[in-house]
Amino acid sequence: MILEVAQINTFYGSSHILFDVSLEITEGEIVVLLGRNGAGKSTTLKTIMGLVHPRSGKITFKGLRVDGLPSYKIARRGMGFVPEDRIIFPDLTVRENLEIALKKTAKGKGFWTIQKIFGFFPVLEKFQSREGGTLSGGEQQMLTVARTLMGNPELLLLDEPVEGLAPLVVKMLGEIIKQIKDQGITLLFSEQNVKFSLKIAQKVYIIDKGMTRYQGSVEELRENEEIKKKYLAV
């Protein structure tokens, strides 16, 4: 088990957002957190990454507890995070955005290099000399994913990766996510796009009103019309 989240409770000030949320991810899986807008999906990812600290519960990554650690220490242990708002350095070129994020592994080398990234994202190679702020939304999303990969993570968290993107770009990102998995990276992503998610994920958790309402395989969810109608409005 690469990640175990056990009964975490997260607050924003006095507002209780997550209620005893639990999930488990096996190495090599693609897992999706589904739920409506405001259900608590993003807060779950931010809590795992250490951007928000739970008041109770336990988060274990590669056998070691990480709840309470600052996010940079969690990143150093091999976790990467792609935020929903596609934060890039708009005044740096595409290549500079990638180079600034390069991090070698504990063994002194990394799988992800500039050339490896360009092999996965040909559009970034094409625009490598352009400033990040001039890219389209889909191109910026690819750059954000690529920059996170330059940190050589073992677990990649993606928050709403295809929100607001054109259908062609959504399809392209779905294929890229599958290819990233094939390189040995475990993925956990949050999403509202049910159709997209069920095409690429293997396991599903549904978050609603800050609580885990469902967990199971993609195949089980496809056949469960009651759950889909109740929590996903599909």
Image (tube, rainbow, N blue to C red):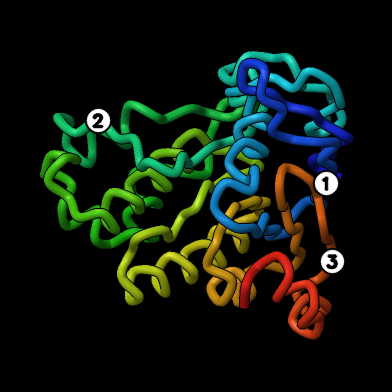
Q: Quadrant of residue 45?
A: top right
Name the kind of residue labelled 1 in the image: Leu
Res. 216 mark = 3
| Location of residue 149 in the rendering, given as x and y in whole percent from the top left corner | 48, 43
> How far apart in space, not on screen, are marks 2 and 1 (Cα)?
33 Å
Q: Name the mark on residue 23.
A: 1
| Image height of 147 relative to 64, above or below | below
- Dot 2 amino acid type: Phe
The percent position of residue 35, horizontal first and vertical second, equals 64, 58
Residue at 19% from the left image edge and 55% from the top image edge: 136
Is 175 in front, or is 103?
175
Residue drawn 17% across and 50% down? Answer: 135
Residue closer to the observer: 209 or 200 = 209
- State the residue position of label 2: 89
3D distance between C-alphas at marks 3 and 2: 38 Å
User: Is 93 on the left-hand or right-hand side of 140?
Assistant: left
| Category of crowding for the residue at label 2, using alpha-carbon neighbours closer than 10 angstroms: few (below 14), some (14–19), many (at least 20) | some
| Residue 228 x %, y % | 72, 74
> Considering only order in the chain, which callout, 1 or 2, is on the residue closer to the N terminus?
1
Q: Amino acid at mark 3?
A: Gly
